[in-house]
Amino acid sequence: MDVWSLVRFVHVLGAILWVGGQVTVSMLVLPVARRRLGERERAELMRTLGLRLGVITMAGFIPVQVATGVLLAWHKGVTWASLGDPGYGRTLAGKLVAFVLVMLAAGLHGWANGVGRRTLARSLALASLIGSLVVVLLATALPVS
Amino acid sequence: MTTTHDRTTDDHAVSRLPEGPPSGSSGDRAGLLGGLALGAVMLVIALVVALSGASAPTGGSVAVPGGGDGPRTVQVTLSGMRITPAVIEVPSGTHLVLEVTNDDAMRHDLVLASGEQTPVLGGGESSTLDLGVVDAGVDGWCSLPGHKAAGMTMTIIASDADGEAVESRASHTSSGTATGVGATSERAALDLHAAPGPDWQPYDPHLQPLPGGTEHIVRMAVTDTVVEVAPGVRQTLWTFNGTAPGPTLHGQVGDLFTITFVNEATTGHGIDFHAGALAPDQPMRTIDPGEELTYQFVAQGSGAWLYHCSTKPMSLHIANGMYGAVIIEPPSLEPVDTELVMVQSELYLGPDGGTADEAAIAAEAPSAVVFNGYVNQYAHAPVAVRAGERIRVWVVAAGPQRGTAFHVVGAQFDTVFKEGAYLLRPGNAERGLAQVLDLAPGQGGFVELVLPEPGRYPFTDHAMVDGERGAHGVLEAS
């Protein structure tokens, strides 16, 4: 148990909250809201929730994940060049690509909601969730050495 | 997030809502399918990035892609008796450059069979090796003593267009040659029945009397010394003050020992006194040639204590002569007529004039087992004693790998002291006597005996194979 355990803890905790937040909103809140609320109220609720999640993501999640991720990579001796090495490097590179795609999807989801393209917004929300799971999958696939 | 912000958001949301398409099951399904498709695309992209290139390698292996102009640079790290990556695979014809960094506290280098080598690198230092165009396999290793045997090796594999490895150059030049590490065939020949030359002087087995006073100030210098270890066999040993074993220190419980440890040899060394208790970090650290440190300890307990080099691999450093004894008397120890010290150790002969054979050490296959550093030393130079006098023999098992079963033929021990306690004292209730003092590597003790009549009393390690390959001497009682 050292300071790196703490950094790793914060990084994993961030991922848990992000994935958990998405799952909660789309799989718990949305179905209930559909059953219990009128369309206008539901839309207000979902939009508010989405915006809050977006703000938390921009102000908290992304800076924390990037900072702790960079720290962990530095601690492990990862270099830009080593991201090309098969094994650890490429798995991490894949994870980073997935992370960027997820953030893009999440951002576009907010934009699509904003301009009222709800089908596209729903697609992007689901894609963001699946992409997040891909990030977690690749994180667990990182070779331990 | 303030209330104001939320309200704005809500207003915004409400104002925008009517512009959206009506929600319906077809929109939901389209959103679902679109999301699944997008998610699948993400999965595929991420997996392609993660899994493309060479097949997943085993740990410590790096494949350098071919093509392109200019040299390919690979970072190589020396740390923890490992070279990382241990395998570098390059297409034949690649111009390869290694950036070698020593990430360790101890010194390392990297030597390649093709001739390139870094200087000896201290902790954190780096050096660049330009191998030129690599068209055949090359082996590499750290040339510091013992490091190669401990696992500091690497291989550069040059593969041709079909991905087949091109024959290694190392197969033509014995990788051992550059380090002076002898292959088995080069080990010095040992004749257990030969006699030492006329100039040979045995190691004095007598314990020197207490120097007086409670403070002992000792200078211990490590030097590379060519030493005769058996008749006609010379080895370059690493010695404390020129001999193996090193000097025997002699004191009493509570004495303060201040040792100035000086490295006058050619590689890093350290020292570890079992007779003192302290945090090893500083006093037992490895120092480079030309450096010195002060090692201070209070002998808190009696015993026959080992001291030895503390630099890895200790098996090699001890096998190559870096051991000795510290004798701390139990309180009110009665004086005896003759007091001897026998430090038993193994020899793993390297080439004549060379250092100990690392492969033999790893195989735990000693060439000889010796008292005080020389094969059958006190058979060649019997120790003169008198019948009827009390003899005390201090015994320390230096190893590096074997203990001892110290026995005197024709005699019985009436006193046995082992690892801080008497196992046997004269006149015990059982009227018992002892035949062997058994010591694991690193242990020590003493026995006392009285030889009943004049004669030649052999003493030996009663592990017979070890006794017959050099752990053998004679007490000649007049």
Image: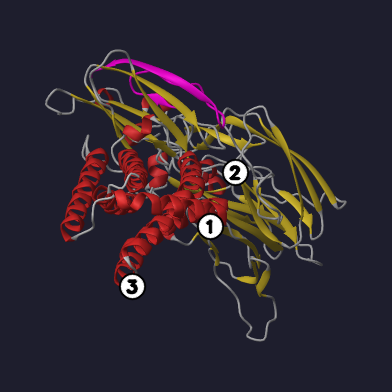
Secondary structure under the numbered disc 1 in the rendered image: loop
Label of residue B375 in the image: none
Q: Position of residue B451 (x, y in %)?
A: 64, 65
Whole-angstrom CA distance, mark 1 to mark 3, is: 79 Å
> In which quadrant of the rendered image does the C terminus of chain B lie?
bottom right
In the image, taking residue B134 as reference, residue B143 lies left or right, namely right
Q: Position of residue B374 (x, y in %)?
A: 54, 43
The residue segment tinted magenta is B110-135
Write down the residue under mark 2: B309
Q: Which of the two discs, 2 and 1, labels the residue nearer the N terminus? A: 2
Label of residue A36 in the image: 3
Write down the residue under mark 1: B441
In the image, taking residue A123 as reference, residue B365 lies left or right, namely right
Looking at the rendered structure, the kind of residue marked 2 is Cys
> Residue drawn at (28%, 37%), measured in percent from left and top?
A86
- In this view, the residue in front, B118 or B219, is B118
**Which of labels 3 and 2 is toward the front?**
3
**Which of labels 1 and 3 is toward the front?**
3
> Residue drawn at (22%, 46%), measured in percent from left and top?
B38
| Label 1: chain letter | B
